[in-house]
Amino acid sequence: MNELPLQEDAALAPESEVAARYAYRASLIGGAHQFELSDGGLAWRIAGRRGLWRYGDIAAIRLSFRPVSMQARRFRADLRHINGGRIAILSTSWQTAALMAPQDAGYRDFIVTLHARMAEAGSRAALIGGLGATVYSAGFVFLALVGLAMAGLLVRSLAVGEFAGALFITGFAALFAWQVGGFIRRNRPRVYRFDNLPEALLP
């Protein structure tokens, strides 16, 4: 999904007002994405740009679980401004070409504090968890079809006496169900409240 341009504001919050900070590297090229929470709002520095989003101007937050090949535990928060700007905050940071490091505690604390600040400001933002309903349904159907195919292969292997093949299929099915099934389970579409963040979508 293409992200819309960020909505910039004139200045960041004074250092004395900062309540929480978080930063991550989205890639090995370029600087870190930096975020601060203050009385004035969410201040950000991304790719040479910077700005301040007032808490009341954040229109929506979507929390999701987004593992990748180099990091099986990666969480993501997508923020949308009332003017259409978007910001993504990830729970992992690139360290080297072969290492994507988790930042579970820092990410969780920042996201929890952000929600608390928005609630204090009387925010009416949409709070959404998991994938969109269409994407989730497609993933669930795919998982069911793969499960049926695996069950068919297992029955056929047992019928012809290929016990080694049956054992392999069983192990592969268990691994597939653990990884893909966990992704589907965590990313169930939901709406949550400021005082009840979905634990499955936080480190």
Image (cartoon, grey):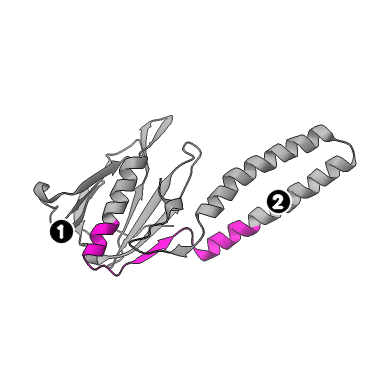
The answer to the question of whether label 1 and label 2 lie on touching residues, with beta carbons closer than 8 A, is no
Mark 1 and mark 2: Cα distance apart in space: 50 Å
Corner quadrant of residue 104: top left
Q: Residues within 10 Å of mark 1 (few under 14, many from 20)?
A: some
Which residue is the site of mark 2?
A: 147
Q: Position of residue 42 (x, y in %)?
A: 22, 55
Q: Percent x, y for residue 175?
A: 63, 40
Q: Residue furthest front?
A: 195
| Residue 147 seen in the figure | yes
From the viewer's perspective, is 11 left or right of 35?
left
Residue at 55% across / 48% down in the picture?
Answer: 182
Identify which amino acid the numbered label 1 is placed on: Gly
Compared with 54, 108 (above or below) is above
What residue does disc 1 label?
40
- The stretch of residues the image draws in magenta is 115-141
Which amino acid is tagged 2? Gly
Q: Secondary structure at mark 1?
A: loop
Q: Residues within 10 Å of mark 2 (few under 14, many from 20)?
A: some
Q: Camera-side residue: 102 or 32? A: 102
Q: Split into 4 quadrants, where in the image is the C terminus?
A: top left
Seen in the picture, residue 29 relative to 41 is either above or below; the reply is above
Could you say where residue 82 lies in the image, as x and y percent from the top left?
28, 68
Residue depicted at 41% across the width and 31% down the height: 99
Magenta region includes residue 90: no
Secondary element at image label 2: helix
Q: Residue 6, can we see it?
A: no
Sooner in the amino-acid sequence: mark 1 or mark 2: 1
Residue 25 place in picture, x, y as percent: 32, 40
Side of 67 where 146 appears, left or right = right
Closer to us: 198 or 63: 198
